[in-house]
């Protein structure tokens, strides 16, 4: 069942950010846009390339009013150890949530129950805590975080402009569509 249009379920978790352990809950997602990137495991291969790429987009996503969260089934202690020992991870400024209980991974329907690891799931959540985009990749397929910038801009635009839609490859400032009977068959 799709999570699109559904409010995220309540959770509480421990996280690591900027040298500190912090508490994070579903309530932190309210009142702002949120980008949530699940990944299988710390100290792995594709994951550090993705999280480093996500860090490259972090300032832009923050400027757009979004907080970024990465989530794996590792603990917040493991996130700190990875941060302290990996060249790719040491520069990460966004919040790294630990989900050793698998609660959050199950709620977002990205838990590989057999392996006990999260799949590569990416979600954009609006300020009401409602899921607006979902993307889930196979373990061997890394994600491009630059795509999140355009997706976030589109999600923000349609929230502000109900009744309009953003066509494929839409960029901020470009023309949108207003679905109507007159438009049927003319695209």
Image (cartoon, rainbow, N blue to C red):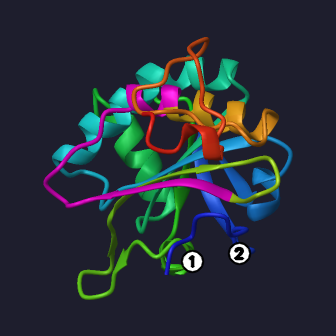
Residue 113's place in the image compared with 121, above or below, is: below
Mark 1 and mark 2 residues within 8 Å of each other at the beta carbon: yes
Please give the name of the residue rendered at 32% of the width and 86% of the height, measured from the top-left corner.
Answer: 113
Residue 15 position in % (x across, y down)? 60, 54
Q: Which mark is residue 41?
A: none
Residue 83 location, quadrant: top left
Residue 49 visible? The answer is yes
Residue 125's place in the image compared with 57, above or below, is: below
> Does the magenta-highlighted stretch encompass residue 64?
no
Which residue lies under the disc numbered 1?
Answer: 107
Name the foreground residue: 50 vs 136.
136
- Identify the residue at the far bottom of this view: 114
Please give the name of the residue rendered at 31% of the width and 54% of the height, measured from the top-left corner.
Answer: 42
Label 1, secondary structure: give it: helix
Residue 65 position in % (x across, y down)? 73, 28
Residue 76 position in % (x across, y down)? 52, 58
Which residue lies under the disc numbered 2?
Answer: 9
Residue 146 position in % (x across, y down)? 40, 25
Magenta-drawn segment = 131-150
Name the foreground residue: 103 vs 18.
103
Please give the name of the residue rendered at 48% of the width and 33% of the height, measured from the top-left corner.
Answer: 167
Please give the name of the residue rendered at 61% of the width and 39% of the height, measured from the top-left corner.
Answer: 182
Label 2, secondary structure: give it: loop
């Amino acid at each position: 069942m799709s999570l699109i249009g559904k409010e995220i379920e309540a959770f509480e978790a421990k996280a690591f950010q900027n040298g500190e352990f912090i508490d994070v809950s579903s309530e932190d997602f309210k009142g702002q846009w949120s980008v949530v990137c699940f990944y299988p495991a710390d100290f792995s291969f594709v994951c550090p390339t993705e999280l480093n790429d996500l860090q490259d987009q972090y300032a832009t996503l923050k400027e757009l009013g979004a907080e970024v969260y990465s989530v794996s089934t590792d603990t917040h202690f493991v996130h700190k150890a990875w941060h302290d020992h990996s060249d790719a991870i040491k520069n990460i400024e966004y919040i790294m949530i630990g989900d050793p209980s698998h609660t959050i991974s199950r709620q977002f329907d990205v838990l590989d129950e057999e392996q006990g690891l999260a799949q590569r799931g990416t979600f954009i959540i609006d300020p009401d805590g409602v899921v607006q985009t979902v993307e889930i990749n196979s373990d061997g397929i890394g994600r491009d975080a630059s795509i999140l910038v355009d997706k976030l801009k589109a999600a923000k635009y349609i929230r502000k402009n109900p009744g309009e839609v953003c066509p494929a490859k839409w960029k901020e400032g470009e023309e949108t569509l207003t679905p109507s009977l007159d438009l049927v068959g003319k695209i």
